[in-house]
Image: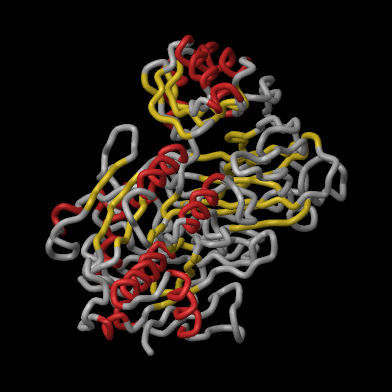
């Protein structure tokens, strides 16, 4: 595997660790270590049977088993390692309720499931339609999953971050609009920065941010700061580009909380959303799914959604199951059954697998899959590959075709690997694998189709990353097409810029990188034009398409979209 050292891009775990160290965008160098030998056979595995309950996510089954056989202390340690939210003997989960026509007709979704949750000692935090976010004692997990009112029990889905005056303002021509008399009486468009956290934003009011903003948290704990400064940096860029816009700073932590945030935003008159987050295993990659549904609902109300394309061009693999020796394990290349990647010490592993057998999206859920693959994670211990963990959800016809492993780390620089096992499958389905928080390109990476949910949504304005100084493509910027063949991203816009939150741009030292910076530039540009013209959102999109600086292949392409964002005449 090639050892390509590169500047780390934004990520929520990375951000938290290195903000505390005051150096989270410093270039990281991989430690040199012996390259593991090529492995042609997995050999004997220290393995366990697939969890028996098909309506319970496998990691929750494992957590409950650890608690019952090894005690609560061991279960708590396992939960902490896997980034599972536990409080005492309870775990935070999402229950997907079966459709109950009587309760749906009365406007109360999942009434029977709610009753069951509460009877088992569960405490409901929030809900959205058939999704109920709550805490539940570990001992009651299997009992809840057994109930006929329950479709599935899982951990909450969570997004990842796609991590002064921004240099991009002048580069995209936004400064030429600054002295124009606003067309609209309210003196500015309403722009929402929808993000994970806004740490430190209050200290920037009246300087890097407007003197007043509307801030609202939809997290269960109500924490608008959340120990994360990512949203604040994005808001700085929006304000730089559209200084007269009214800003809404809105944060959330889970999929259910995002749905509720969008329900609230629909009544606030917001015209533009800046979204520098991405989701893995939250949709089929064809513009459908619950997160994409939020984007489409916003678009139907005339709200423009500028979405970061993702930072996964060299951390993405996809292909069909290839098993020439018939042993049930995927061969990534030749006889190689491992896809390897490197991590420095204490960097956490995130690996997400899905396959394109989601079933039909009906606006609420997918039909589900009966093709069953499992995901295995290994670490090279200097002598051999050591099995660390696996994700082996059941897919029996109604479950999503997804597996994920997240949270493990080593106290030393190490080479990790993933393997994919066919448990029970009869179709030739396409598989997609993404790693998160890796310090170099993964082995056998495939850049096409690496666009991130919800940037794959039809109405999302997907934003890729280029240099603010010379339009050079940033190699990590996710590429299209979508899995249904549409060209994405829609625009490329500046990255590697200066912010008060993350410091000035200094080559190889600091700055704000990632498609996280691309989305707020586009959102700000839309808000700027909206404030100064009578144009509708649709007309502004057309204007930006025509003014974009064409890069790469002539016309719209899967690296740069229509080209680099440009608002100059």
Q: Residue furthest top?
A: 119
- Occupied quadrant, residue 79: top left
- Inspect this view and state whether residue 414 appears: yes
Q: Is residue 5 left or right of residue 235?
A: right
The N terminus, quarter of image: bottom right
Q: Nearer the viewer, residue 327 or 449?
A: 449
The C terminus, quarter of image: bottom left
Which residue corresponds to the image point at 16% horizontal and 59% vertical from the top-left?
Answer: 204
In x, y percent, where is residue 486?
Answer: 65, 67
Q: Nearer the viewer, residue 389 or 428?
A: 428
**How many marks on residues?**
0
In x, y percent, where is residue 346?
Answer: 41, 44
Q: Nearer the viewer, residue 384 or 401?
A: 401
Question: Image height check: is 41 above or below 272?
Answer: above
Q: Nearer the viewer, residue 102 or 139?
A: 102
In x, y percent, where is residue 363?
Answer: 60, 44
Question: Image height check: is 323 above or below 127?
Answer: below
In x, y percent, where is residue 123?
Answer: 40, 19
Q: Is residue 538 left or right of residue 559?
A: left
Q: Is residue 248 left or right of residue 137?
A: left
Which residue corresponds to the image point at 13% horizontal and 55% vertical from the top-left?
Answer: 203
- Occupied quadrant, residue 101: top right
- Inspect this view and state whether residue 29 appears: no
Q: Is residue 375 left or right of residue 271?
A: right
- Occupied quadrant, residue 186: bottom left
Q: Residue furthest bottom?
A: 569
């Amino acid at each position: 595997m090639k050892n390509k050292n590169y500047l780390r891009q934004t990520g929520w775990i990375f951000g938290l660790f290195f903000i505390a160290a005051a150096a989270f965008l410093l270039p990281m160098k991989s430690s040199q270590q012996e390259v593991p030998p090529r492995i042609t056979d997995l050999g004997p595995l220290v393995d366990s049977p697939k969890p028996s309950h098909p309506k319970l996510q496998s990691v929750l089954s494992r957590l409950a088993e650890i608690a019952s056989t090894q005690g609560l202390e061991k279960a708590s340690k396992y939960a902490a390692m896997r980034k599972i939210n536990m409080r005492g003997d309870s775990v935070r989960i999402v229950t997907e309720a079966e459709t109950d026509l009587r309760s749906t007709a009365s406007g109360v979704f999942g009434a029977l499931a709610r009753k069951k949750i509460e009877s088992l000692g569960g405490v409901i935090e929030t809900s959205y339609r058939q999704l109920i976010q709550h805490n539940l004692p570990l001992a009651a997990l299997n009992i809840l999953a057994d109930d006929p009112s329950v479709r599935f029990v899982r951990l909450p889905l969570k997004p990842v971050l796609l991590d002064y005056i921004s240099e991009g303002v002048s580069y995209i021509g936004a400064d030429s609009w600054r002295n124009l008399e606003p067309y609209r009486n309210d003196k500015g468009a309403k722009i929402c920065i929808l993000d994970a956290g806004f740490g430190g934003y209050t200290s920037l009011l009246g300087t890097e941010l407007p003197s007043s903003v509307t801030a609202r948290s939809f997290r269960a704990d109500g924490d608008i700061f959340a120990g994360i400064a990512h949203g604040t940096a994005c808001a700085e860029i929006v304000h730089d580009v559209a200084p007269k816009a009214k800003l809404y700073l809105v944060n959330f932590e889970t999929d259910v909380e995002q749905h509720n945030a969008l329900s609230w935003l629909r009544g606030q008159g917001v015209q533009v959303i800046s979204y520098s987050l991405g989701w893995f295993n939250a949709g089929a990659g064809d513009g459908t799914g619950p997160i994409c549904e939020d984007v489409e609902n916003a678009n139907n109300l005339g709200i423009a959604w500028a979405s970061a394309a993702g930072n996964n061009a060299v951390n993405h693999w996809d292909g069909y199951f290839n098993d020439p020796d018939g042993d049930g394990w995927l061969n990534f290349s030749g006889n190689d059954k491992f896809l390897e990647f490197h991590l420095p010490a204490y960097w956490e592993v995130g690996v997400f697998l899905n396959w394109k057998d989601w079933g039909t999206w009906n606006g609420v859920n997918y039909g589900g899959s009966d093709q069953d693959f499992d995901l295995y994670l290994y670490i090279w211990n200097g002598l051999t590959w050591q099995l660390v963990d696996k994700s082996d959800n059941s897919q029996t016809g109604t479950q999503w075709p997804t597996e994920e492993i997240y949270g493990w780390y080593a106290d030393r620089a190490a080479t990790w690997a993933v393997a994919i096992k066919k448990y029970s499958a009869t179709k030739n389905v396409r598989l997609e694998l993404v790693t998160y928080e890796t310090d170099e390109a993964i082995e056998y990476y495939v850049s096409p189709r690496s666009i991130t949910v919800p940037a794959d949504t039809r109405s999302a304005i997907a934003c890729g990353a280029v240099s603010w100084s010379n339009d050079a493509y940033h190699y990590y910027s996710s590429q299209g097409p979508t899995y249904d063949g549409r060209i994405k991203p829609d625009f490329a816009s500046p990255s590697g810029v200066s912010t008060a939150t993350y410091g000035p741009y200094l080559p190889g030292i600091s700055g704000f990188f990632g498609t996280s910076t691309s989305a707020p530039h586009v959102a700000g540009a839309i808000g700027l034009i909206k404030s100064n013209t009578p144009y509708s959102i649709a007309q502004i999109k057309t204007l930006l398409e025509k003014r974009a600086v064409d890069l790469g292949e002539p016309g719209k392409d899967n690296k740069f979209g229509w080209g680099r964002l440009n608002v100059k005449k």
